[in-house]
Amino acid sequence: MRKLHLLLLALILTFSVIAQDEKPIEEKQYLPQAGSIAIGIDGGPIFDYLGNMFNGTINNGLNFNENTLYFRYYIADDAAIRAVLSINNSTNVNRFNIRDDAAFFADPLTGNELEDVQTIKNRDMMLRIGYQGFKGYKRLLGFYGADIGFRYERAKTAYEYGNQMTVLNPAPTTHWGSLATRDLELNNGAKKTISLGAFTGAEYYFMPGFCIGGEFGLSYGASFTGQTNSKEELIVGTVHVEREVAGNPGSRRTNLTTEFPYTYGSLYFMIHF
């Protein structure tokens, strides 16, 4: 019996030493921590692509036409400063061949051509900055927060004509017809929008640092649109005149709306690092 007791004691001591030498299995860190940075995109195009894969859509492809980017900086394990940035600026230059009036008047059989140019500039920029707090269990986090935003929109169209407007040719040929009064510039009034909002939603971390989420919220916005104006040219008597023409005097609009999605996409992906 004494030998049995000694054997059991030896086994217990052996297992105790082995247990102390074993390293604990490290738990995966799924959730972001203070100091983490995150970027995100709208998940809609990805879900559309996957859905089209299963229904046999021809020429299926990822179409990331949403140009809004999401950013976060975590000031604590359960709180972050977030920003939403969207820039959608474009310049389109359209060129059109038109008859050379001077050459045509000298020789109707001539094939000489000139060029009219239309330049369209669109500016659309938006920035929202806010606070976001998190609360949840394991990989599922609910969140809440508030933000403030500013958006600037403007459109301008300019024209350059191949045929010059003169006393001898007061309605020159253009791509848009023979015009006695021609537009040189069209300026839509700049639209400026200030917004305030509150939001809530949830995220699920399906991989360490990778989550999918959705949100909705309440938003108040005030938009101010400036006066439109244009510049045109014409012949008055024997004088070539360029004049400014005032358009709509501008407008103001306010709205209070519930929104889904709020600012991020209906479903979005965030990557943390």
Image (cartoon, rainbow, N blue to C red):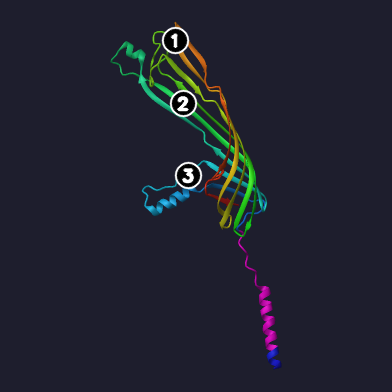
Depth order, front residue of 109/196: 196
Residue plotted at (48% across, 47% down): 44
Magenta-drawn stretch contains 62: no
Q: Amino acid at mark 1?
A: Ile
Q: Residue at x 49, y 21 (%)?
A: 185
Q: Earlier in the sequence, mark 3 or mark 2?
A: 3
Residue 101 point in image, percent of width and height: 36, 14
Image position, residue 147 (x, y; %)? 63, 42
Q: Secondary structure at mark 2?
A: strand
Q: Tag 3's secondary structure?
A: loop
Question: Would residue 17 be counted in the magenta stretch?
Answer: yes
Q: Residue at the location (64% across, 44% down)?
A: 146
* Quadrant in the picture for residue 14: bottom right
Query: Which numbered marker is on residue 119?
Result: 2
Q: Is residue 100 left or right of residue 221?
A: left
Q: Is residue 52 left or right of residue 75?
A: left
Numbered range of the magenta stretch = 6-29
- Give the numbered dot on residue 30: none
Q: Are marks 1 and 3 in contact (CB under 8 Å)?
A: no
